[in-house]
Image: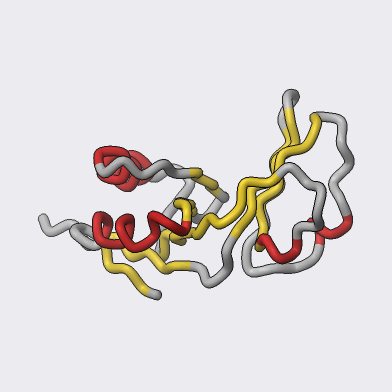
């Protein structure tokens, strides 16, 4: 059986990953529609990831991240996809920030590692810019 190549597209925006106290309200600027926004609240923190130009000064942020979006029919029950993407990147010394949604996955890498990550992933994925 031939396994089809995974298809990844590179989102155009530089993203920032913001950290807030667990009791912080979600700021209005994080609710604007963008190509990519992820808001996650746990018992310990509030994390918001979105295009960094939308983030106002004074917010604790890790900036200059880029996202690979897993394209195609990927169900929430798919097994091993994140491991298949994360392992070769880890072996290449590239840290990731993973964001999963109901329909797909996003692998974020620091922009300084985007070219190297694309090279590593292109060995078994089709990369669309």
Tell how many labels.
0
Near-viewer residue (20 or 44): 20
Looking at the figure, which quarter contains the C terminus? bottom left
Residue 91 shows in this picture: yes
Residue farthest toward the bottom in the current orientation of the protein: 129
Residue 80 shows in this picture: no
Decide if residue 83 is on the left or right side of residue 62: left
Residue beneath the point at 30% across and 60% down:
6
Near-viewer residue (26 or 92): 92
Decide if residue 14 is on the left or right side of residue 52: left
Q: Residue 95 at what x, y percent from top left?
A: 41, 41
Near-viewer residue (82 or 21): 21
Residue beneath the point at 85% across and 46% down:
26
In the image, residue 126 above or below residue 63: below
Decide if residue 26 is on the left or right side of residue 47: right
In the image, residue 7 above or below residue 16: below
Looking at the figure, which quarter contains the N terminus? bottom left
Residue farthest toward the left in the current orientation of the protein: 1
Residue beneath the point at 19% across and 59% down:
123
Res. 74 image quadrant: bottom left
Q: Residue 2 at what x, y percent from top left?
A: 12, 59
Q: Residue 87 at what x, y percent from top left?
A: 29, 39
Residue beneath the point at 30% across and 57% down:
116
In the image, residue 98 above or below residue 72: above
Q: Residue 23 at what x, y percent from top left?
A: 86, 30
């Amino acid at each position: 059986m031939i396994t089809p190549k995974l298809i990844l597209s590179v989102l155009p925006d530089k993203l920032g990953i913001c950290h807030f106290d667990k009791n912080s309200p979600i700021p209005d600027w994080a609710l604007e529609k963008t190509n990519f926004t992820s808001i996650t609240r746990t018992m310990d923190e509030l994390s918001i990831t979105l295009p960094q130009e939308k983030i106002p000064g004074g917010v604790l942020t890790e900036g200059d991240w880029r996202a690979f979006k897993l394209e195609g029919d990927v169900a929430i029950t798919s097994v091993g996809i994140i491991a298949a993407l994360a392992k070769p990147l880890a072996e290449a010394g590239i840290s990731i920030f993973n964001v999963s949604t109901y329909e797909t996955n996003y692998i974020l890498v620091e922009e300084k590692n985007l070219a190297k990550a694309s090279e590593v992933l292109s060995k078994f994925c089709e990369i669309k810019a």
